[in-house]
Image (cartoon, coloured by chain):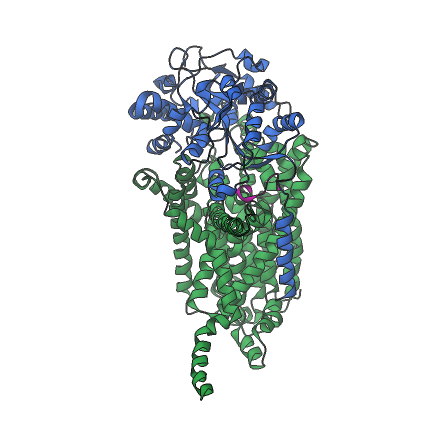
Chain colours: A green, B blue
Amino acid sequence: MLLQDAKPFTAKAKQLLAPFRDSWLTGSVIIALLAAAPILAVAFLAMTSNGDFWGHMVQNVLPGYITTTLLLMAGVGLGTFVVGTGTAWLTATCEFPGRKFFGWALFLPMAVPAYIIAYLYTDLLEYAGPVQKSLRGLMGWQTPRDYWFPEIRSVGGATAMMTLVLYPYVYLLARSAFLEQSSAVLEAGRILGRGPWRNFFTIALPLARPALVVGISLVLMEVLNDFGTVDFFAVKTFTAGIYDVWLNMGNVGGAAQLALILLLFVSLLLFAERWARRRQRFDSQTQRAPANNTQKLEGLHSALAIIACSLPIILGFVIPAAMLVSYSIRFWGDEANEKIWQAAWNSLTLSGTAALVVTAIGLFLAFAVRENGGKTIKSVSRIASMGYAIPGAVLAVGVMIPLAGLDNRIDAFFRASFGHSTGLLFSGTIFAILCGYSARFIYLTFSTVEAGLSRITPNMEGAASTLGAGRWEILKTIHIPLLRGALATAVLLVLVDSMKELPMTMLLRPFNFETLATHVHQYASDELFEESALAALMIVIAGIIPVILLSLTISKSRGQ
Amino acid sequence: MNPALRRGIFSLLAYALLAPSAFAGESINLYSYRQPFLMKPLLDGFTKKTGIKVNMVYAKKGMLERIKAEGINTPADVVLASDIGRLNDMVLADVLAQTKSKELDSVIPANFRHPDGLWYALTSRARVIYASKKRTKKGEVLSYEDLTKLELKGRVCIRSGKNVYNISLLSSVIAHKGKEQAEKWLTGLKANLARKPQGNDRTQAKAIYEGVCDYGVVNTYYLGKMLTNDKKPEQKQWAASVRLIFPNQSGRGTHVNISGAGIIKHSKRKALAVKLIEYLTSDEAQKIYAEQNFEYPVKAGVALHPIVKAWGTFKADKISLSEVAKHRSEASKMMDRVHFDQ
């Protein structure tokens, strides 16, 4: 009797608890919430705005900020799309001399931080720089009024600089998408009489859309959160406005409000894009492309391909790296270099750890979204990944608030219960920096893995699940092997981006802790950039090594 | 749990715990807006003299928010800033401690410290005008107001209006002459600019050397740094091409800004913190500031660097810096209204 009564009750409880028993869902919701905490903290901060700045902003500066930001986004978006997909298509599907070399060398500019390339090209191209000087010598011009030369410190200049170092994001994703595309589809196009151009525009490009969207959205978010470059060029973007309200008007709450608007704008863009392809699927049932599926370019075409692939490398990597080398030689043995090895070690270990941690989180979230498909996990994951669009220092404050809050709660508890103070456990530690990097870079890993997953047919999971495999097992035996390319991409992106990361590292770090990027900033901010050129060069070199290793992994994952 | 994940979590925890501890031995913790490499000779001197180790975090943005978030548990004892604006923000946020030190009060002039001892200036620097030796007549520009003269059209260079030094300069003009006059002045200055505000202070000297403009608004110490720059000798040429003008000598005086320090309210080592600030205003430290960074010591009687001495004495604007700092928000908005940076 008792037993009979109990049955419906336990059944009901089971039903109620079902979502929580599902360790995947619970785990992923918790992780997503933790990851979203800094953004929620920024939202909290936005409610503390003091003083009215909106009237002033709307009347005087906001229209200008918005126009400049949109111009910059459009310019860099278009520039990186053309350069990134163009070179990706050439190296992925065409045969010409040097193709293998270009395959990985086109990644190189990615290792150059945008603020550094901006410094270097300003030295080169401004009125007092060697280029204009020799032009004046050659043409006999005397003053700036005698001739016209494009102003490097302008929206155009910022667009060019950012395009040069950001196109590899698009290239990286486009290339792996093109490489993973089934040759059968393109062959079908060819058999139906389409030339390479039409094949590219009507088949390859639309099929690569999820990956391209990820690449371009990464670029646009980088454009939005950049402050170093636009500040140096005195280009007034929305982000410059955020810092202005914060630091000059002393209103951190107002700055947080502006940051949220930025976030909303990016979310809308991404949502619109998703909505536009809501009925499309991008997975493929066919086998991978055989490696010999390339189009041989001859004569003029091959020469043009070589030029198209070398230009971005020369402008985005060779010239800046050569300048850094020459400065490094000039200031070799300088006191600025004394602590550089410790800084390099810190940069490497920090970025390496961040790459693994953030990739793991991204994989976990993307997989949870795919498997559960529930609204909660979907929206929390999306919020969590939006940290990338927020200017670094603002997000750092968002990381600090919950972390220090937790520290102070633990401390209060220990004081009350044991009369002993624990002080700050997490704030101002390397753990805090890692939390910061996670908050900022989840988008990199979540979106690359998600794009990778979208190319895997759900039928595979279906089959595995029918055969009795659990979710961990499916992830381990099916997804991770198939996602090798995407995971390598994610690791690479976080690794290189963490090496370059500045504002969060500066604010969240422990005492006496320097990375290469903070080391460079110390000198650059006192107008002594050249003296830290060696550290800047090391950021670039440290970025090259994983670039080469991982591009090899990506090629290997294709069985080439 | 996946063993790899478990290992990862453990190594993370170990990482956090093994992070360099700021509490070993007798030491003091600095949150600094000034670069560590600039502070190093001074802090080394302090450690040598007292045996107290100095730990430091340097950041340009968000330090105040960090102090606020850390609350009563903040490890920071002293904050160093290179501009009155930052110190004033800290005063408003109530994160600084009232300090009493007879020594500091006797060494530092009253307009260079907060009345309740919330902050103390360590050095001062003047915001002056550089003029091309070749292309300008002596006496053409004698004040900030002269920079708006019609005949200077297209001949003036300056860095971004949103830079702290320019915000402070404009705030001082607002404090003296009121909003309306200040905006008129700023509009006039904007109309005379040779190019969009850009670069840093050294950039303006370079621009004068290259003939882009004839006048620049710049801090004093950069001239000293450029004149002695053996690593980039071309900067010596830029510096040699300009003459330094201390503006408004027959009026309110030249605008000066400070670098300064304050003790954090929740510091647990306030006695040590006072010791550090006292050291930084000692003859020894003030001399290092003067010689290394070409700044003006706040302590009377400390020898200037010969280069700085050669610029001559000048009348500094004696207005209270706290008063100037009050107008920063308005100054920033004014820069927007006249579209100074476009």
Q: How many marks?
A: 0
Percent x, y for residue A222? Answer: 49, 48
Q: Nearer the viewer, residue A345 or B78?
A: B78
Q: Is residue A226 above or below residue B312?
A: below
Work out which quarter of the rendered image holds the C terminus of chain B and state it. Answer: top left
Q: Nearer the viewer, residue A239 or A220?
A: A239
Q: Main secondary structure of the magenta part?
A: loop
Q: Residue at x 64, y 23 (%)?
A: B230
Query: In the rendered image, which quarter is residue A556 located in?
Result: bottom right
Q: Is residue A483 left or right of residue A203?
A: right
Magenta stretch: give its range: A506-515
Image quadrant where residue B295 sits: top right
Residue A507 belongs to the span the image colors magenta: yes
In the foreground, A11 or A411: A411
Image coords of residue A196 (percent x, y):
53, 63
Locate the N terminus of chain B by quadrant: bottom right
